[in-house]
Image (cartoon, rainbow, N blue to C red):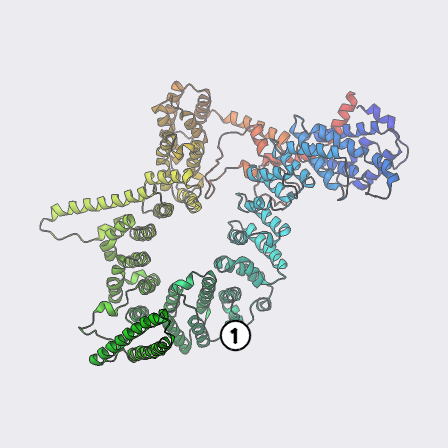
Amino acid sequence: MGRGKISNINMSGDSDLEIEEAFRRAQKAHNNKAKLVASLKNRYNKLEDKTEFHEEFIRCLKYAMIIYTREPAVENVIEFVTRFAASFETPVNENAEEEEEEEGDENEFLNVLLNFLLESHGANSHAVRFRSCQLVNKLLGSLSENAQIDDDLWDRIHEAMLIRVTDKYPNVRIQAALAMSRLQDPSNLDCPTIKAYMLLLENDSNPEVRRAVLSCIAPSATTLSKIYKRTRDVKEKVRKLAYQVLAEKVHIRALSIAQRVSLLHEGLSDSADSVKEVVKTHLLPAWLRMQQGDVLQLLHRLDVENCAETAMTTLQAIFSMASSPDDLLQNGVRLNERKLIPVDSLTCENVLYWRALCEFVKNKGNEGEELLEQLLPETAIFAEYLYSYLKSITQLSEEQRADMTQLEMVMTQEFIGQQLILLVGCLDTSEEGGRKRMVAVLQEVLLMSNTPSSLIGLLVEKLIGILRDDAQKIQMIAEIISDVREPILPISEPVDENEKRRKQVKLAEVRVQIMEAKQTLEECISCQDFSRAAELKESISELEELKNQLVLEASQSADNIKEQRVEKFPQKYEAAQLIMSDPTTLLKCLTMCAELFKQMNIKRGICPTMNALIESLILPGVSNPNPAVRNMAVTCLGTAALHSKDLANTHLVLLLQITQLDEPKIRISALRALIDQLLLNGLNILQDKPAPVSQDDSNEQPEHQAEEESTIQSILKMLSDFLDSEICELRTETAEGLAKLMYCGRILSPKLLSRLVLLWYNPVTEDDQRLRHCLGVFLQLYARASRTNQECVEESFLPTMRTLFNAPVTSPLSEVDTSNVAELFVELTRPSTLVKPAAVQAVSVHDSLAVRVCNEILRDISAPEVRLFCKTLSWLEINTEPGPANSELQLLLKDILQEVKDKHCIRIIEKLCNQLNGDRCSKSAGAQDTTLQNLDDNNGEVNKDETKAKRAKRGQKKASTAKNGKKASKAELSSEESDEENVPEEPSSVRPSRRAKMAAIDKTKQDLTALMNQEANGS
């Protein structure tokens, strides 16, 4: 392969180039590669024996293939080789059979090059493997759509790339995945490429590999679920690309309603702005195009009845992209001359669009006033419109509720009514006449018996929002509740008892005569006396008419009534007969009461009217046999207790009893009320309770304090026990409540924090997404809030680890990765993660944690967990400045060195001792230079997202942590690097160091010519 062989194929002519010269020129970006390709191909075509050309070409190519870094010179050569090889492809012409032989000659070079690359894909050098896959990818990508290659060669390429997608290096996997994009067959359920793609999407740890697979995988019924799951990837770039793929390649009908709603909900609420932007600018416009721009049709595809909030967010995003106000009016609902949608034209979609548009315009302030006037009528007109619709809502009986068609119809009516009620908030209620009419309508609707219970709370909220005076609000709701419970009663006129008795006797005689006549009729028919039977039949008909007349007279006398409002009940009537106490009425009244307490300011306190509602309605409802009534009564009691500490102290024991004794749903409501009390008043709520008056105050006061402490301990113990409850909802509510109490500073307990961490990692809670998400967010925010919280985390470290180490085999905790738990604690206690770093202190949290870990190691030096503890020490950011803490830690480390036998532990401890002694300065500098050199020579573009310190992810069980002070080896760095070719990419925001910049500048000056000349001279 020396240069002497090149002279054997020299050609004359200025347009011909030597192979080596072509490679030299191809390295320069300014050279025209099309001319180089044409010149070199001209030379190739003139050769009779092309073997030597193939060998020389591959020899020159090898110099580029041994360089791993993405240098411009090498990339230019790769591009040149690709173009040159692709130039040999000839268009497929079925009618030209005589050209088959010539076509085979043309494809000879392409086959030779592909065979060489396939032979090189298994080389020991990761650079060669990378370049082989890269060239295969570019060659296959440069071929036309109808290109044909040999079946055996195709199978070999397929097999080779399937091997390379499992390569150790991410860059190699990326290129192999991209190369297989034209080898996949979505119609084949057993396609190995599709299976490899799905495996990479699910399991590959490198985000750039997942992005590469997303960019080339073909959507199908099999792969769609995998693509959909990538919208929840931990990496922002992967999520962004997943949404782009779904927008460009997947039709909205291929997705289920749940998937559509989930994509919009999670995409528009994503923590990354770039993901939100992709959903707004790519996914939503694509879906609208599929519906011919019809927004209402898009809402129909989302089933807005069950996802109103997501639909509202979607509409807000669509409105924000509108170029002018006219677009908002043209693309939506059609209003009549009264600025209303006709009642018979109301649908879930157009009423939701109407409400969303009105709220969007109203939020613009003064800019949207003119447009809002075009969308809504006057308040009085809308009040009549609202009343007419709510009055027409169908009220189903128990038998009718069994019919799903009728039930769905009523649910649709309730949803439309809910949206119309919410539109009240967009009306201008400053005009007195319109406001009074709206208040009267809302009152009337609340009093109607057919008003659905789902609308009661919303109606009360809007009514209270319109009224301005607090006393008027309370008085009006109390009057409505009173009217509902004590309605206008129908009182019958006095009836003569003798006349009534006479009619009843006569009716009884007629009934007896009818029975006797029927019996006689049966006897006549059996004796075949048909003439007598005919006479009896006529007699029976007359008696039936007489009976019906008597029954009608009795009913008319009962219906002859007058209405009378009972102000004070006479003694001869019982109050239980006049006050409505059925579950439906009680539930309606309690719902209004709960909404009243919710809307009123808690600083106002409890007025006599509110206190009367508590005594007459709420407390009796707590003991009601109906579970729904009890649940609402407990909710009302908990909300009312927030307005008064005295009321909270009085009924605290009752709430505690309900949390332990009632049905799960009611227990959860009582638990929420209890947590709210502790959040508002703290654990010292009982201290505000007045102590009983006694003659011996000195003896009673300590007993009172002891009773308070005992109650507080009982509450905490009860909450701790609930964390082990078999009722999933109760366990989740307790964990969320404890997280709130700890984050707000009401509780500072390392034991409870340890319980929460163990609950987060426990495999039993794996399916409880709400619990996992809540605790994942809490742990990050809590630890970063203050140093005090980090100290609490530090104290909970050893109890947590001991629990995991001592967990029996039958316990789910035995499956937890203890190393991962230790990494989480190290990350949570890292001083650099504090939102507001504390003043510089001599001893950091990691210093204290290191002392704790060392003492734990010395407790039992032969324990199996010693190795993990030593590993944990190497992850800590320990202060190396001289001081008492440093000296104490050095003494402990020396004691450990004297007793520990494990070589791995000894290396870690020795390294830590050198770090504390300050002897590692020169070693650290040398190690840094070596690492940098390794990176320059072998690794190239290292994925900075993977090598920087990893934070604990929200809602994730796994928490990966960077080990400061621990240098990554060459293999580790290489395994984390990634390539981003053919994948949309944004510039990295991480600023490289000065040393890395200088190394990068030197690398870009590298030229393959020197290497080629060196070998040529040697030969």
The picture places residue 176, in percent across and down from the top left corner, at: 66, 36
The picture places residue 68, in percent across and down from the top left corner, at: 66, 32
Q: Which residue is mark 1?
A: 339
Q: Is 94 positioned to the left or the right of 949 in the image?
A: right
Quadrant hosting residue 178: top right
Between 460 and 223, the one nearer to me in the picture: 223
Between 948 and 137, the one nearer to me in the picture: 137
Q: Is 10 positioned to the left or the right of 251 in the image?
A: right
Seen at 57% across and 55% down, the residue is: 280
The picture places residue 806, in percent across and down from the top left corner, at: 36, 29
Label 1 residue SS: loop
Does residue 499 sit above or below 644 in this rendering? below
Question: Could you tell me which quadrant the N terminus lies in?
Answer: top right
The picture places residue 512, in percent across and down from the top left corner, at: 27, 73
Quadrant hosting residue 890: top left
Q: Is 316 positioned to the left or the right of 843 in the image?
A: right
Quadrant hosting residue 820: top left
How many numbered callouts? 1
Q: Is 482 positioned to the left or the right of 816 in the image?
A: left
